[in-house]
Image (cartoon, grey):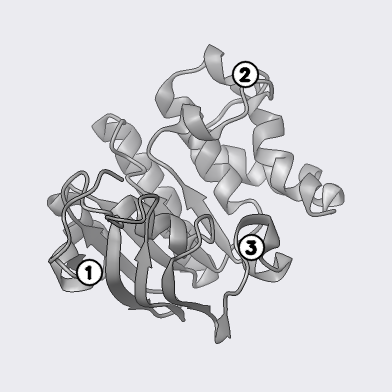
Amino acid sequence: MLELHSVTAGYDRTAPAVRDASLTIVPGEAVGLLGPSGCGKSTLAKVAALLHPPRSGRVVIDGEEVRGWRHRAPRELRTAVGVVFQQPRLSADPRLSLYDLIAEPLRATGRRAEVVERLPELTAAVGLTDELLRRRPHEVSDGQLQRACLARALVLRPRWLVCDEMTAMLDASTTAALVAVVEAYRSESGAGLLAVGHDGTLLERWCDRTLRWDEVADRTKDPART
């Protein structure tokens, strides 16, 4: 399971973006987290993805409590979670081609031999052509770059996916295509999903259950931007 217990987190010590938030996702389950902009849900998503340490509370992945964050987390936990953010240009190295962007996690974890085997399957699944794969981020659209970011999130075959407003900047056809890729991966792998967003219609259609922010976190805090 992916478990968050009484998590308080944020960048401002006097007004944490998240206060006393808890949720649990079982393997194979898709859980939506619905809330308005600025409520703290993106901060909670970063905690779940092991990218931001909580001020208090616990995160447990498959029975193991997380005690290190970002590169201090054990590799087996870091690679267990794949994450896709709302703004692909802020999460993509502008110096890399899309091919190298997707291959980067394999190379960084000593699995270079899997690049040739894994990338053709993934790039075809997300709808990237060989010609697009040779381009750099500034040479492609937001939708094309987000396809590459999703492929990068899946390349290590994570057991858990965190999609933080993954489709907020995309048109309807690209949204449908990327959701279909995520669902195909979940069906094949049994991965669990936390889908964060403010589009209740999309989350209700996509997820097995959808939680509103006030069901997850303490609402007595002052709102803070995520």
Which kind of residue does numbered mark 1 sit on?
Answer: Ala
Q: CA distance from mark 1 to mark 2?
A: 39 Å
Return the residue at label 1.
217
Q: Quadrant of the C terminus?
A: top left
Q: Which residue is mark 3?
A: 78
Q: Secondary structure at mark 1?
A: loop
Packing grade of label 3 (10 A; few <14, some 14-19, many >=20) is: some
Which is more N-terminal, label 3 or label 1? 3
**Number of the front mark, 1 or 3:** 1
Residue 117 is at least partly visible in this image: no
N-term mark: 3 or 2: 3
Residue at x-position 60% and y-position 66%: 80
Circle 1 or circle 2, nearest the eye: 1
Residue furthest top in the image? 139
- Considering depth in this image, is 195 or 78 the residue closer to the camera? 78
Q: Which mark is residue 136?
A: 2
Residue in the foreground of this view, choosing between 16 and 139: 16
Q: Amino acid at mark 2?
A: Arg
Q: Which amino acid type corresponds to the residue marked 3 in the rendered image?
A: Arg
User: How many other residues sit within 10 Å of disc 2, few (<14), some (14-19) or many (≥20)?
Assistant: some
Residue 185 on image: x %, y %: 50, 59
Residue 51 percent coordinates (x, y): 53, 55
User: At numbered mark 2, what does the secondary structure look like: helix, strand or loop?
Assistant: loop
